[in-house]
Image: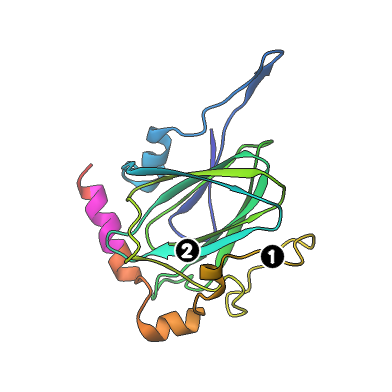
Amino acid sequence: MQTRELNIPHAWEFTPEQHGDARGVFFEFYRHEELERLVGHPLTLRQGNTSVSSKGVVRGIHYALVPPGQAKYVTAFRGAFIDYIIDLRVGSPTFGTWDSVVLDDIDRRAVYLAEGLGHAIVSLTDDATVSYLVSEVFNPTRELAIDILDPEIGLIFPPEIDAPILSAKDSAAPTLADALAGGYLPTWQDSLSLYDSLESKV
């Protein structure tokens, strides 16, 4: 499995080695020891999620308050997405910036994003299916959203997605500036403290 750290600290890309023959293909989409080697601690699996999206569907920007936050390991089992990782940790050297990875059923990459990071996906195909392994169960009081169309963040969508399809909740999400002013964002220091505490348990 090949690994690459993204431009956002505490986010990584994983590209599996695929073994194909006349029967089909086999690959390992997750290896706990590879993740632990990079992150410094294992992913404690608390919940698994799957969503199926039509072309043009946008989900995010979603994040969870820290602690406990919610780390995610994300891959696409059908179709294609652009996966965006946004640094929402106030005080981080890359606060407000983002990186992206194409997740599809060809290269079969996965991404890991640590607690405190924002996450969004844009479906490039119909019936695109993405699955998440996450470190905490859903908690509606601590899971929030930022406007994915916020020009301050400036996510760049592919040209074929000229009319992104958002849920009512995501359409009503605040801007980054509003969330910052309201104190609704995780902090860099709280996130680092959480990562250190998880590493100390190894």
Kindly identify which numbered label has been placed on residue 69. none
Point 35% across, 81% down: residue: 183
Which secondary structure type mostly characterizes the magenta part of the structure? helix
Q: Badge 2, how many Cα within 10 Å: few under 14, some, many 20+? A: many
Callout 2, which amino acid?
His
Point 31% across, 64% down: residue: 66
Q: Can you say whether 164 is above or below 132 in the image?
A: below
**Mark 1 / mark 2, whichever is N-terminal:** 2
Point 43% across, 80% down: residue: 179
Q: Which residues are magenta?
A: 192-199
Kindly identify which numbered label has been placed on residue 62. 2
Circle 1 — which element? loop
Kindly identify which numbered label has been placed on residue 164. 1
Residue 122: which quarter of the image?
Answer: bottom right
Q: Which x, y percent locates residue 148?
A: 58, 70
Residue 153: which quarter of the image?
Answer: bottom right
Is residue 196 a member of the stretch shown in magenta? yes
Q: Which x, y percent locates residue 31?
A: 43, 32
In this rendered view, identify the residue nearer to me: 99 or 48: 48
In this rendered view, identify the residue nearer to me: 7 or 66: 66
In this rendered view, identify the residue nearer to me: 145 or 155: 145
